[in-house]
């Protein structure tokens, strides 16, 4: 009933990068192979934290279902009248300060990224390369607090072109150098203008 309310103009659904988490194992750092929001989903991310195997599938599946529900409701509302729908796949936005310096493969600043710890302890070239790949995957999803506020502000008010049928699914990350996540539609349709870059933040920190 809410979706068909004559007073509601826009529904914004906060979905997640975990809907594409399986891509972590598939060319995660090939910046030329951009991941668009319309690509086939890869639901659930697998990683280690404090030596425990973590699998986000149980979290990612409801997010994916929410995306599909929004798309179906948008089609109904386009015919009967009602709000338009925007789904933003949030990258990595930590609680609190959300500093680029606390990003690690555990997904939580307070936990050890033990999938990289073991590789670092081995010290061989292949293991160290794996560490770099993991760090790149996780860091490239960073969404700064400033950019988080901006993209959701735009998601609430930006007009959707008629050909979108009242629905947009898009990515929400900062302007991180070398990332695979494609922000074209976020920028062109929503008018999103991200200001921050995880790599620039890390360089500034290293120079201090």
Image (tube, grey):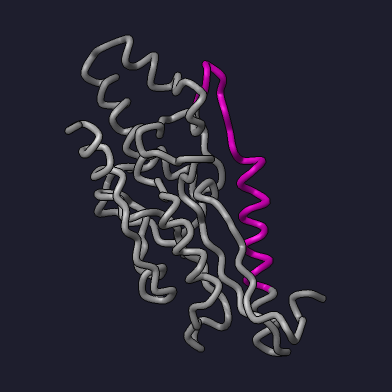
Q: Position of residue 196 (x, y in %)?
A: 32, 53
Quadrant hosting residue 55: top right
Front-lying residue, 98 or 37: 98
Decide if residue 149 is on the left or right side of residue 55.
left
Q: Is residue 59 above or below residue 119?
A: below
Q: Is residue 28 above or below residue 50?
A: below
Question: What residue do we see at 24% from left, 54% from top?
Answer: 32
Q: Find the magenta span and give its range.
A: 48-72
Which quarter of the figure is the N terminus placed in? bottom right
Q: Is residue 170 above or below residue 112?
A: below
Q: Position of residue 57 (x, y in %)?
A: 61, 40
Which quarter of the figure is the C terminus placed in? top left
Question: What residue do we see at 51% from left, 40% from top?
Answer: 96
Secondary structure mostly taken by the magenta-highlighted segment of the chain: helix
Question: What residue do we see at 23% from left, 13% from top?
Answer: 124
Decide if residue 126 is on the left or right side of residue 26.
left
């Amino acid at each position: 009933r809410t979706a068909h309310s004559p007073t509601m103009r826009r529904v914004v659904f906060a979905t997640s990068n975990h809907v594409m988490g399986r891509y972590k194992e598939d060319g995660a750092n090939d910046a030329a192979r951009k991941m668009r929001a319309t690509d086939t989903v890869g639901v659930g991310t697998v990683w280690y934290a404090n030596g425990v195997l973590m699998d986000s599938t149980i979290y990612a599946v409801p997010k994916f279902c929410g995306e599909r529900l929004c798309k179906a409701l948008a089609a109904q509302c386009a015919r009967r009248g009602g709000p338009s729908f925007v789904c933003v796949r949030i990258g990595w936005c930590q609680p609190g300060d959300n500093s680029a310096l606390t990003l690690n493969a555990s997904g939580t600043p307070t936990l050890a990224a033990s999938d990289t710890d073991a590789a670092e302890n081995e010290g061989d070239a292949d293991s160290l390369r794996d560490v770099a790949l993991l760090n790149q995957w996780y860091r490239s999803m960073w969404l700064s607090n400033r950019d988080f506020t901006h993209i959701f502000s735009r998601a609430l008010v930006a007009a959707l072109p008629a050909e979108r049928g009242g629905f947009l699914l898009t990515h929400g990350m900062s302007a991180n150098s070398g990332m695979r996540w494609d922000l074209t539609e976020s920028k062109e349709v929503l008018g999103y203008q991200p200001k921050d870059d995880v790599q620039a933040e890390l360089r500034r920190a290293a120079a201090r």
